[in-house]
Image (cartoon, grey):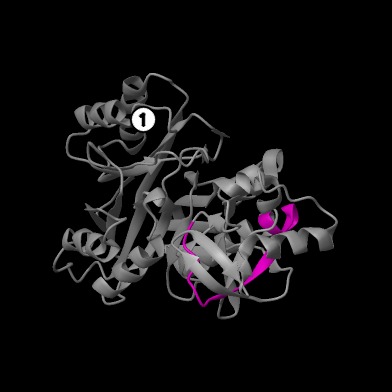
Amino acid sequence: MKVSVVSTDLQDSAAAGEYLAAEVQKALEKPPGALVVFAAPQHDHQAMLSSIRSRLPDTIVVGASSAGEFTNVTSGQGLACAMGLVGDDVIFSSSFGRNLSRDAAKAAQEIVSGFIDTPPSRFPFRSALVMADALAGHADILVDQLTLATAGQYQFFGGGAGDNAQFQKTTVFCGEDVLSDAAVALEILSSKPVGVGVSHGWTAASKAYRVTASEGMRVISLNGFPAIEAFEDHAEQLGQTLDRENPLPFFLHNIIGIEAGPDHRLRVPLAVDADGAVVCAAEVPRGSVLRIMRTSTASAVSAAKDAADAALAALGGSPAGALFFDCVATRLRMGDEFASELSSLQDRFSDVPLTGCNTHGQIARAEGQFSGFHNCTAVVCVFPE
C-alpha cells in the first residue's frame, strides 16, 4: 500500500478541497483508491467535497468534521487534512447508515450492507474506518452491532465527528454527502494486516459507585444519590472546587471510568442539570460500576506511545502510514501540553505519513485490544507497506 498525507490552512473551502486532492494525487503519482478527510467545523464541507470530487471523480471519499487536526509536521484548529491510500494489495468500499439516534442497529446493518459481499481470497484481512456523528449518541451500540453484523470478522477503528467541543453540530462525509445523525465507514480489505492500538493512561482515584439511575447521556444517581454529589465529595477530598454552573474545568481532570474487565471505559462529564444529574459525552449504562479517574501529562504521552506500540505489533511489518485519534477533551485538559503527546507520535512515525484529529469519542475493536466506544483514549491505526 502507498499512503500520502496533505494538510492546508486555506480558509476557502473549495480551494482547500482542490489543494488536498491535487497534492495527494501528485504525491501518489496516481489518483488514490480512497481519501480520508478531516476538516474543521468552520469549513463549508459540501464545497470542499464537491471540489475533491471534481478533481478525483473515481476516488472513494470518507471523513468527518474535526476538533483539532494534525499531521507529521503541523497541528492546529481550523485546518483540513487528507490521507490518500492506493495499492494493488488493497481494495476499498464506502457506505453509511442514517438515523443513528433512533436505531443504531439498523444504521449498522445499512453500513455493512455496503461492504463487499464476497471478498477475494487474496485479501483476507478485513478492517473498517468508522466515523460517527457523536451527538446522535448510541456509538457504543453501533460498534457492538457492526461486530455482530460482520460475525466478528472485521476490526474497526475511528471516532466521533467533532466541532471543537461546542457540541452543537457534527457531520460525517461519504462521497459528496455531508451527513448528520449518521455514521460512515471505509471498508479496507488487504493482503496484509492493518494494525490497531488503544490506550488511555487513566487510573481509578475514587471508590466504586453503582449507577442506580441513568437515561442516555445523563447519569442521574450514584448509590441512590444525585450523581453530582459523588463528584463534590471527590473535589472536597482533593481540596478542589467544583462549580455546578461551570463544572467543566473540574470534570476534564476527573472523568468517569466504567469498569470493563481489567480496564475502565472512559466517559467525559460535561455539565450538571437542575436535578443534580451529570451529563456526559456518551452513554453510561444503568447498573454499571464506575469510579472517578485521574491522569497526568506523562501518562497521556505514555498512552499514545503504548497505542502506537500495540498497533505496530499487530501490523507485524513496516508501516506505510498512520492514523491517530484522541479526544478533544484530552486537548482541552492538556492545553499546550497536548503538543507533547502529539510530538511523541510525530517522532515515532517521522518516516511515514501521519494524520488524524481530535474527536468526540474514539472507536476501536480489534484483536487483543480494549474494545468499544471510548472517551479520552488514544487510538492508533497503521497501514502496511
Camera-side residue: 236 or 142? 236
> In this rendering, would 250 be left or right of 18?
right
> In this rendering, would 107 be left or right of 26?
left
Residue 316 visible: no
Q: Residue at x 63, y 75 (%)?
A: 223
Camera-side residue: 271 or 156? 271
Q: Is residue 317 above or below residue 45?
A: below
Could you say where residue 382 lies in the image, as x and y percent from the top left? 45, 57
Could you say where residue 57 lies in the image, as x and y percent from the top left? 17, 34
Q: Residue at x 69, y 58 (%)?
A: 254
Camera-side residue: 224 or 306? 224
Classify residue 178 by image quadrant.
Answer: top left
Q: Is residue 294 above or below residue 161?
A: below
Disc 1: which residue:
20
Mark 1 element type? helix
Q: Residue at x 72, y 75 (%)?
A: 207
Residue 36 within the segment the image draws in magenta: no
Could you say where residue 300 lies in the image, as x and y percent from the top left? 67, 56
Camera-side residue: 46 or 24? 46
Quadrant of the image containing the C terminus: bottom left
Residue 232 visible: yes
> In this rendering, would 208 be left or right of 323?
right
Classify residue 172 by image quadrant.
Answer: top left
Could you say where residue 119 lies in the image, as x and y percent from the top left? 18, 67
Q: Residue at x 38, y 46 (%)?
A: 3
In the image, what residue type sits under mark 1? Leu
- The span picked out in magenta is 282-300
